[in-house]
Amino acid sequence: MKLIEQIVKRFDAKYQDDNTPWARTDIPVEVKKFAELVHEQTPKGSLLDMGCGDGWASIYFSEQGYDVYGIDGSPLAIEKARQKANKAGMSAQFIVGNALDYPYDDLQFDAIFDRGLLHHIPEENWTAYKKGLLRVLKPNGLYYLGAFSDDSEKKGFDPKKEGRLWNKVMDASGYWTYDHFFNQEVLNNFLGDDFDLVWQSKDVVASPNGSVLIHSIFKKKV
């Protein structure tokens, strides 16, 4: 089984065990900031939530008036997202799929939201990730990326001390997972030719597992 398939299986197992600490009940300030910037640019635009999980962010964006689409590789996550959407009275547009395939039309979205997907995608797949991102996002479209910072010490792994920005481990689920850690140089090298950075922040307090997120909002260059 390929690593990317292992990662999807692991997340499905996490949802099966209801062990999903990344699923929020509150709305973080950086997510509200993204919604604010998208609203200023396109008040009633279309938004793609990549790796949407149980739909907590999708539902928030829908409540703000956006036409929201969510995609996740975990069938159980999508089932939970649809249930939450129905309970919230949201018109659900969630699908199970490989986000790297981007099963959407060219230039379909005014905004794309990724909180926690890219940092679990092996670097060898980043080219496909960005190619699809550029295809479906409109010119001047906004893109939020929430990813592990290299200031993290996630579960005892310190990327600065180890001298590498990735870590692959097998956890209690029995599947391999992959974490990648980001800094400004990595972001510039990966996105700088195609996007302008418009806003950025970083977690002040680490999560219980030691991870720190760097939050970046980019605008696609014309």
Image (cartoon, rainbow, N blue to C red):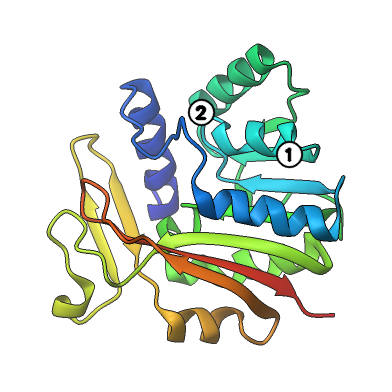
Question: Which image quadrant: the C terminus?
Answer: bottom right
Please name whichever residue, 155 or 179, is drawn nearer the observer in this view of the structure: 155
Residue type, label 2: Ala
User: Which quarter of the figure has residue 11?
Assistant: top left
Q: Which label belongs to residue 164?
A: none
Where residue 118 appears, x then y in whole percent? 49, 60
The residue that disc 1 covers is 69
Q: Quadrant of residue 19?
A: top left
Q: At which x and y percent is residue 53?
A: 52, 35
Residue 16 sits in which quadrant? top left
Image height check: is 135 above or below 61? below
Up/down of 83 relative to 96, above or below: above
Mark 1 or mark 2: which comes first in sequence? 1
Q: Tell me whether circle 1 and circle 2 mark residues in contact (CB < 8 Å).
A: no
Image side of residue 182 versus residue 54, left or right: left
Q: Residue at x 73, y 34 (%)?
A: 62
User: Could you say which disc has been placed on residue 77 in the image?
Assistant: 2
Neighbourhood count class around disc 1 (C-alpha, 10 Å): few under 14, some 14–19, many 20 upward? many
Q: In the rendered view, does 183 fall on the left or right side of 207?
A: right
Q: Residue at x 22, y 73 (%)?
A: 159
Residue 176, relative to residue 62: is it above or below? Answer: below
Vertically, is 159 above or below 2?
A: below
Which of 119/110 is in front?
Answer: 110
Residue at image point 39% right, 40% down? 22
Q: Secondary structure at mark 1?
A: strand
Disc 2 is placed on an element classified as helix
User: In this view of the protein, can residue 96 be seen by the observer?
Assistant: no
